[in-house]
Amino acid sequence: DAKTTQPPSMDCAEGRAANLPCNHSTISGNEYVYWYRQIHSQGPQYIIHGLKNNETNEMASLIITEDRKSSTLILPHATLRDTAVYYCIVRALSGSARQLTFGSGTQLTVLP
Amino acid sequence: GAGVSQSPRYKVAKRGQDVALRCDPISGHVSLFWYQQALGQGPEFLTYFQNEAQLDKSGLPSDRFFAERPEGSVSTLKIQRTQQEDSAVYLCASSLYRDPRFSTQYFGPGTRLTVL
């Protein structure tokens, strides 16, 4: 699976949009971009995933650049409960690997 | 609403002791994973089950680590002769399909193991 690069930390004001970037310049055509988050003392939680089109669900939006070398996770109205480590993961839906490969993620702190 | 549960939530062991960590996946989920998370790091894969079959144990760090899922539901991760470097959070995840890449992995809260 392709390697991802994320900033180690970010701050965001409560009620504002949080935009979390991820670089995945070596992504292959069959690899998806997944986002998980991990709130302190909890297990990771799935947020969203996409291949090349932008995606939106009740939690967030995922914007993938046209060349697919980077993406941005958008939390439209961040709350204090969104404070967590956010992981960007690239994985293929073919091949033998079944597990998720996490990096170090981005610590998002939502400030009151 | 049953998610993935793990027990105990916290375990303190003396170096050299054996420990057993339990995972109760979501009912009906075929795939089950164990991950290890060191402090300040992302989770790292240990092993993967499809029903009762352990299909991948390439992430187990040593032969002191052993996992089983004898009836295809509850799983136990056992660590023999614990060492200080085994101190970590152990996470269990399950997903619905035989091929977990096509379904969401749901994680439990983890067991924090501290080896003194």
Image (spheres, coloured by chain):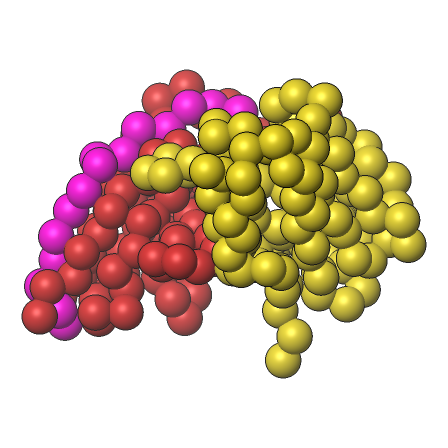
Chain colours: A red, B yellow
Q: Residue at x 21, y 35 (%)?
A: A7
User: In the image, is residue A13 part of the stretch drawn in magenta?
Assistant: yes
Quarter of the rendering containing residue A17:
bottom left
Range shown magenta: A1-15
Residue B47 vs residue A108, the one in the foreground: B47
Q: Main SS type for the magenta part?
A: loop
Residue B63 located left or right of residue A74? right
Q: Residue at x 69, y 55 (%)?
A: B22
Image spot of residue B21 (x, y percent): 66, 50
Count of marks placed on residues? 0
Q: Residue furthest right?
A: B71
Image spot of residue B29 (x, y percent): 76, 59
Q: Residue at x 65, y 75 (%)?
A: B2
Q: Residue at x 38, y 43 (%)?
A: A87
Image spot of residue B99 (x, y percent): 75, 43
Would residue A91 be seen by someone viewing this image from the given angle?
A: no
Vertical position of residue B96 compared to residue A32: above or below: below
Vertical position of residue B43 compared to residue B103: above or below: above
User: In the image, is residue B13 part of the stretch drawn in magenta?
Assistant: no
Vertical position of residue B88 compared to residue A97: above or below: below
Residue A37 located left or right of residue B3? left
Image spot of residue B58 (x, y percent): 69, 23
Residue B57 vs residue B76, the one in the foreground: B76
Vertical position of residue A40 compared to residue B89: above or below: below
Residue B90 located left or right of residue A15? right
Residue B22 located left or right of residue B69? left
